[in-house]
Image (cartoon, rainbow, N blue to C red):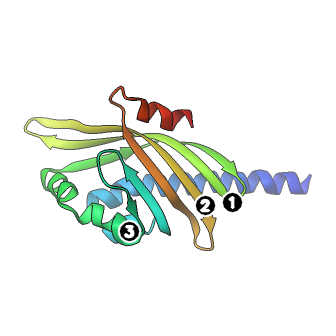
Amino acid sequence: MADAIAARLQALEDRAAIADLIARYGPLADAGDAAGVAALWTDDGIYAVDGFPEARGHAAIAALIEGPVHQDLMARGCAHLLGPATITLDGNRATALCHSVVLAKASEGWEPVRVAANRWELMRTPDGWRVTRRDNALLDGSEAARALFAG
């Protein structure tokens, strides 16, 4: 019985840690904290954003935040909203699926500029859960986004 309770507690803690990691992405991106965003990934982690070259490793992931597309978005005013995520645990690995919406300041309010499907692959590291791969595809009717959600 104690082992079953310990396993259930570990699963709850893992889910909470993963949900927190995903939730941290938006505020870090909106603050322009490139190093903070990159630190969510493993050293060799991959961030594949539909429409952009695949970024591999902390320097390349940080470059997405430091790059002109993101900097222009921040200059307008932006908000990255993610989740809630469905999380599937598999020992020291996990997969999470969620929506993301990027809002940008418009003259009279806010407008969505990117609505996407996200698939996160994560692993437990000595420093906690980290992203090994994140795929992001626009929910524009194409097969790519549906495929992310279908697994």
Seen in the picture, residue 17 relative to 149 is either above or below; the reply is below
Mark number, residue 123 = 2
Residue matched to label 3: 36
Query: Which residue is found at the position 89% from the left and 56% from the top?
Result: 2
Query: Which residue is found at the position 62% from the left and 52% from the top?
Result: 94
Q: Position of residue 51 (x, y in %)?
A: 29, 45
Q: Where is residue 107 in the image (x, y as percent from the top left)?
A: 7, 38
Query: Which residue is found at the position 86% from the left and 51% from the top?
Result: 4
Mark 1 vs mark 3, CA separation in Å: 23 Å
- Please, what is the three-letter code of the amino acid marked with disc 2? Met
Q: Do the residues labelled 3 and 2 touch (CB within 8 Å)?
A: no
Mark sitting earlier along the chain (3/2): 3
Q: Position of residue 102 (x, y in %)?
A: 29, 43
Seen in the picture, residue 150 relative to 12 is either above or below; the reply is above
Q: Which residue lies furthest to the top in this view?
A: 141
- Please, what is the three-letter code of the amino acid marked with disc 1? Asn
Query: Which of label 3 and label 2 is nearer to you?
Result: 2
Mark sitting earlier along the chain (2/1): 1
Mark sitting earlier along the chain (1/3): 3
Residue matched to label 1: 92
Query: Which of label 1 and label 3 is nearer to you?
Result: 1
Mark number, residue 136 = none
- Please, what is the three-letter code of the amino acid marked with disc 3? Gly
Q: Are marks 2 and 1 in contact (CB under 8 Å)?
A: yes
User: Foreground residue, 68 or 1?
Assistant: 68
Which part of the image, by quadrant, shows the C terminus? Answer: top right
